[in-house]
Image (tube, grey):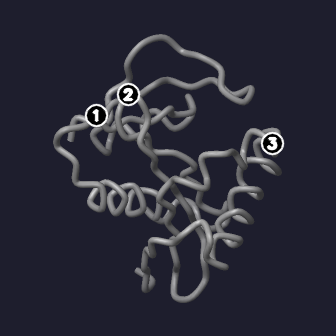
Amino acid sequence: MSEISINKILYTDDSFKIAQQIRNQVFVEEQEVDPVLEMDKFDKTASHYLFFVKDLAVGTARWRITEFGIKLERFAILKKHRGFGYGSKLVGAVLKDISSKEKIIYLNSQVNALSFYQKLGFVSQGSQFQEAGIYHYKMIFKG
């Protein structure tokens, strides 16, 4: 496997612009999410990550604290780098970094990613809903 690294970055870092570019390519261009919904007010306070293969940034993610617990969001791997297990490694690194036992850890999974998150220890909860025009389920991390 390629040499990989996952770096925690700050909203104020120049590297955050790279995370924005990845999110724009995956969510706005591929999935046609409104850019206003994609780049939101929570970016300023969330914890952000960049995933590198060698020295090329190919993925990003963030988490933030909400009234319900810790919400994982904006997991994105560039299209030509999918299928190599990088998404699992990114989720694992974020979960390890959080290491919270007192708060619920959850995410809103797109329907097509349900089985991916189930394999990583998430369980769906509630009914299907739309977010940014895409069907989702809330999923809780059970470990």
- What residue type is disc 2 on? Phe
User: Label 2: how many residues lie within 10 Å, few (<14), some (14-19) or many (20+)?
Assistant: few
User: Label 1: how many residues lie within 10 Å, few (<14), some (14-19) or many (20+)?
Assistant: some
| Residue hosting label 1 | 104
Residue at x-position 41% and y-position 42% = 65
Residue 108: horizontal and vertical position, in percent? 50, 32
Furthest residue toward left:
101
Q: Which quadrant, please, contains the N terminus?
A: bottom left
Q: Which quadrant, please, contains the C terminus?
A: top left
First in sequence: mark 2 vs mark 1: 2
Quarter occupied by residue 117: top left
- What residue type is disc 1 on? Ile
| Residue hosting label 2 | 68
Task: Say which element carries label 3.
Answer: helix
Q: Is 85 on the left-hand or right-hand side of 33?
A: left
Residue 37: horizontal and vertical position, in percent? 75, 39
Residue 103: horizontal and vertical position, in percent? 25, 37
| Residue hosting label 3 | 36
Distance between the alpha carbons at the discs numbered 2 and 3: 24 Å
